[in-house]
Amino acid sequence: ILNVEQSPQSLHVQEGDSTNFTCSFPSSNFYALHWYRWETAKSPEALFVMTLNGDEKKKGRISATLNTKEGYSYLYIKGSQPEDSATYLCASGGLTNDYKLSFGAGTTVTVRA
Amino acid sequence: SQTIHQWPATLVQPVGSPLSLECTVEGTSNPNLYWYRQAAGRGLQLLFYSVGIGQISSEVPQNLSASRPQDRQFILSSKKLLLSDSGFYLCAWSVARIGRGSNQPQHFGDGTRLSIL
């Protein structure tokens, strides 16, 4: 199982501001990087799955990038809104484990109106 | 469309009692199924996964077991609960792919909050 780390653990953002946070993972044996959004009282929702170095994905005001050579991914939120408040989880799948993901502890984002 | 059902939502059990959590998926066939646990302040820990009926892989030695009696049913069990089994349990599914399945997004149930007294 790969060790996935996320930073910061939590952050507070003023409504309208943009923010970003990091997911780092061992670059050896890497196959796929996932991002999930987990809102309070809901189940985690898949945002992105990326596999190639340099991949960039976008969904509305949220985007993500992937650097497989150095083992990190950034998630960006542009113009944060209160509905963006959630815990954002990243997870990495390795070459040796076809179906399994190793999750980070998450970054909890709180957007203040 | 596909849906996943997980129950119960909350459960309070005494130490030493048995456990059965159930998860069912609708709208897809032969999914990969997963049980995760989230301990306080930590990430999701994979407990079990299954790629087919009767096929269970365990990730960590523990007091729990899993079974998949039907294609879209996944059950998490224990004969005797320990205090350390407290936590939030999530069931998930993903589309099965030959080969590199970890590039498929996982879809989660609403979770079960398990408290052991």
Image (spheres, grey):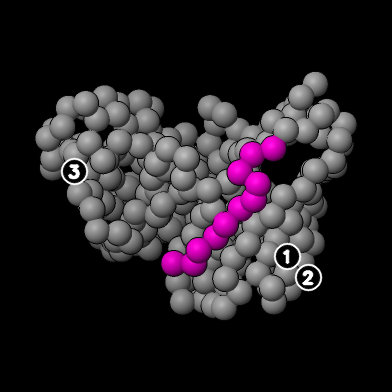
Residue at 61% from the left image edge and 74% from the top image edge? A27
Is residue A6 shown in magenta? yes
Ranked by sequence position, the earlier of labels 1 and 2 is: 2
**How far across and down, in percent of the image, does residue A17 sit?**
86, 35
Per the image, label 1 sits on a secondary structure element best described as strand
Residue underneath mark 3: B78
Left or right, B115 with reference to B3: left
Residue drawn at 26 percent across, 41 percent down:
B84
Q: Amino acid at mark 1?
A: Leu
Residue A101, horizontal then vertical, whole percent: 49, 60
Residues under labels 3 and 1: Cα distance? 39 Å
**Span of residues in magenta:** A1-11
Nearer to me, B67 or B43:
B43
Q: Are marks 3 and 1 on the same chain?
A: no
Between residue A43 and residue A30, name the one nearer to us. Answer: A30
The amino acid marked with disc number 2 is Gly
Q: CA distance from mark 1 to mark 2?
A: 5 Å
Tag of residue A77:
none
**Residue tagged 1:** A66
Q: Residue at x 19, y 39 (%)?
A: B82
C-alpha span from label 3 to label 2: 44 Å
Output the chain of dot 1.
A
| Helix, strand or loop status at disc 3 | strand
Residue B43 on the magenta segment: no
Residue B62 appears in the picture as rendered: yes
Depicted B103 relative to depicted B110: above or below: below
Q: Quadrant of residue B83?
A: top left
Circle 2 residue: A54
Classed neighbour count for the residue bearing mark 2: other residues with Cα under 10 Å, few (<14), some (14–19), many (≥20): few
Query: Could you say whether the residue bearing mark 2 is in a helix, strand or loop?
Result: loop
Q: Is residue B103 visible?
A: no
